[in-house]
Image (cartoon, helix red, strand yellow):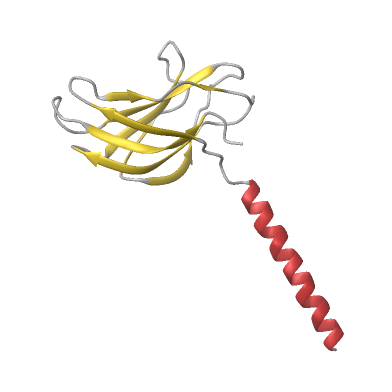
C-alpha cells in the first residue's frame, strides 16, 4: 500500500508540473516598454515602431502605471500611415495583459502603440506606462 501511495504522489507531482508548464505557454509575451505622455494640444502618445514577425499573432498591451490629469486612456496599434490595425479599446487605471481584437496587422511590417488620454482639458497632461508587443507569442 505504501508503494502504491508513493506512485500516486509522484504521478501527482508530474501532472502538476505539466499543468504549470502548459499554462505558462499560453501567457502573452509583452516585451517592449512604453512611457507615453499626452500633453498640451496633443491627446495622443506613440511608442517606437516594433517589427511584426508572426503571421497570426495579435498585438498585446498591459498598463502598469498612470498619472496626471486622467487615468482613462484609449489604446490602439497603428501602421506608419497612422491607420488603426486593431479595434481600439478604452479603460481606466492599470490592467493585466490584454490582446487587441480584430487584428489586421501583417507580417514583416512595423507598427506602433498609440495611447490617447480619454479625459482632461486640452492644456493638461497624463502619462501611461506599461509593456506591449505586436506579436502575442
Q: Quadrant of the C terminus?
A: top right
Picture coordinates of residue 49, whole percent (x, y): 47, 21
Picture coordinates of residue 131, whole percent (x, y): 45, 37
> What residue appears at the point 18 percent right and 23 percent down from the top-left corner?
40
User: Viewed as shown, does residue 79 lie left or right of 15?
Assistant: left
Q: How many marks?
A: 0
As drawn, 73 above or below 12? above
As drawn, 14 above or below 93? below
User: Where, by quadrant of the figure, is residue 113 drawn?
Assistant: top left
User: Where, by quadrant of the figure, is residue 45 drawn?
Assistant: top left
Residue 100 visible: no
Picture coordinates of residue 35, whole percent (x, y): 35, 33
User: Where, by quadrant of the figure, is residue 39 drawn?
Assistant: top left
Picture coordinates of residue 2, whole percent (x, y): 83, 88
Q: Quadrant of the N terminus?
A: bottom right
* Outermost residue, bottom side: 1
User: Viewed as shown, does residue 45 lie left or right of 125?
Assistant: right
* Outermost residue, top side: 81
**Which of 120 and 103 lies nearest the eye of the viewer?**
120
> What residue appears at the point 56 percent right and 42 percent down from the top-left corner?
28
> What residue appears at the point 31 percent right and 45 percent down from the top-left corner?
93
> What residue appears at the point 72 percent right and 58 percent down from the top-left corner?
18
User: Viewed as shown, does residue 22 lie left or right of 29?
Assistant: right
**Which of 91 and 46 lies nearest the eye of the viewer?**
46
As drawn, 24 above or below 30? below
Residue 49 visible: yes
Amino acid at each position: 500500500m505504501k508503494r502504491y501511495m508513493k506512485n500516486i504522489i509522484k504521478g501527482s507531482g508530474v501532472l502538476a508540473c505539466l499543468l504549470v508548464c502548459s499554462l505558462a505557454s499560453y501567457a502573452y509575451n509583452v516585451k517592449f516598454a512604453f512611457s507615453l505622455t499626452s500633453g498640451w494640444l496633443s491627446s495622443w502618445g506613440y511608442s517606437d515602431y516594433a517589427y511584426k514577425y508572426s503571421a497570426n499573432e495579435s498585438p498585446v498591451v498591459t498598463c502598469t502605471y498612470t498619472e496626471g490629469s486622467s487615468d482613462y486612456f484609449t489604446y490602439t496599434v497603428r501602421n506608419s500611415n497612422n491607420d488603426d490595425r486593431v479595434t481600439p479599446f478604452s479603460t481606466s487605471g492599470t490592467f493585466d495583459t490584454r490582446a487587441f481584437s480584430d487584428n489586421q496587422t501583417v507580417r514583416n511590417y512595423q507598427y506602433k502603440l498609440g495611447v490617447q488620454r480619454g479625459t482632461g482639458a486640452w492644456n493638461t497632461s497624463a502619462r501611461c506606462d506599461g509593456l506591449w508587443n505586436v506579436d502575442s507569442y
